[in-house]
Image: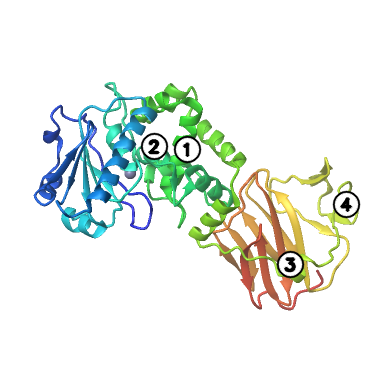
Amino acid sequence: MTARGLAFGACAILAGAPAAAHDDAALTDLDRRVMVELTGTRESSHAVFHFRPDGIDSKALDEDVAANVAYLAELEHTLRMGYHGHVHIFLYQDGEEMERLTEVDGAVAFATGTVSVHQPHDFRGVHELVHIFAVQFERDPDTAGADLFVTEGLATYLAKSDENVAIHAWAAAYAKLGVLPASLGDLRRTFPDGADKGVHAYHVAGSFVGFLVERYGIEKVKQWYVDSSEAHQYFGQGFARLEREWREFLQEFELTVGAEEHVLRKLGFLREPLPKEWANAKGTALFDGRTLAGLAPQDASKWSVKDGLLVGTNDGPWTRLATAKSFGPKIGVRAKLRLASGDALKLLVNGEREAIFARWSSYATAGEGFRSNDRVKIAPGEWVELVVVNDDGRARVYMDGLSLFDLPDVWNAAGEG
Ligand SMILES: [Zn+2]
């Protein structure tokens, strides 16, 4: 179940058997119990709608029925299949009535059994209907079936967007912010748990399944859906490689500013701009774009200049590149860089005050120890702009304009910068 507040609902676990030829036999006990009160019906070629007579304004009901009939036609086209029999769609006056009659708590809408969808009458979107259609996907014996990751992934992708943000945009924003789950295999095993706080696992699964639909077509994805442990058989390559290619696709995805801001707000990140006087301050360039002039590497073999970029390569304990010159205790450093591979990098000011950017968390030194922020992390392969400032003892660290740390009095009594 998905908590209320998301635009789409979760489903109950679906039985794998195809719908019985006679629809009524496929109704669940829950359906029958609710039908005692929802005695009104309307029927279309592939749906039976149940509602409380006089419970829903008739014009609104016309619109609700028309919207769902259109979704069924859309899915027959998208999924390249004819639906056999009727979907039973239970329409409630509101979420409160649905919860009271079904005794299902906290769902926005849900599918149950093999032919039934329960939703507030004005619910829109194909998510739950996809679950019902998927029951009729052709399936051979000796196939593994769909796990929850694949089930919710397909339904979420075909619903196209959540909160008016496209499903790929959610995932691309998670990737850019470094909060995309590190392993889809691990996420599948614990789905829908296992993602960072605030990251919705449905968006992640939806984007991955959508990537496969766009690349291989819906027919292949349907075959894999019912045999979901066997990616290689249907796509010609294994899950790990598909995952890598999906991550590369997300890196190239053109994320709009509006979508990124929406995801940032949802995650509770504040995009706090750099103070104006810092943004406009005249700085000293530390790297001239051609040579290591003015820089003092701890180990010269680890640093080089290639195509105008300063490249550091190190496999082992930290190795340092310092400026030859000192700049006084109040100092800020700005760097545009990319963690091409590996685990972490750090920027130091005053020779000893550290901001560490690791794949799994960000850190700043504070007294004898560290403060951590595992919500904003560096994403390997992505260019980022880092700003680290010792503002009279106040540690301030930014990544792409996001404040990671603002810690008063932890970088006092610093030496020369
Ligand atoms: Zn679902």
Crowding near the residue tagged with mark 3, few <14, some 14–19, many ≥20 C-alpha atoms within 10 Å: some
Q: Mark 1 and mark 2: span between their CA atoms?
A: 9 Å
- Label 1: which secondary element: helix
Q: Which residue is mark 3?
A: 352
Q: Earlier in the sequence, mark 1 or mark 4?
A: 1
Residue 334 in the image: state x and y as whole percent: 75, 60
Task: Determine if residue 350 is in view.
Answer: no
- Vertically, is 213 above or below 353? above
Q: Which residue is mark 2?
A: 154
Label 4 with label 2: CB-CB less than 8 Å: no
Q: Residue at x 48, y 58 (%)?
A: 266
Q: Earlier in the sequence, mark 4 or mark 2?
A: 2
Q: Residue furthest front?
A: 59
Q: Earlier in the sequence, mark 1 or mark 2?
A: 2
Quadrant of the picture in which ligand 1 is shown? top left
Amino acid at pointer 4:
Asp
Residue 14, numbered label: none
Crowding near the residue tagged with mark 2, few <14, some 14–19, many ≥20 C-alpha atoms within 10 Å: many
Amino acid at pointer 1:
Phe
Q: Which residue is mark 1?
A: 208
Q: Mark 3 and mark 1: span between their CA atoms?
A: 42 Å
Residue 288, numbered label: 4
- Label 4: which secondary element: loop
Task: Determine if residue 373 is in view.
Answer: yes
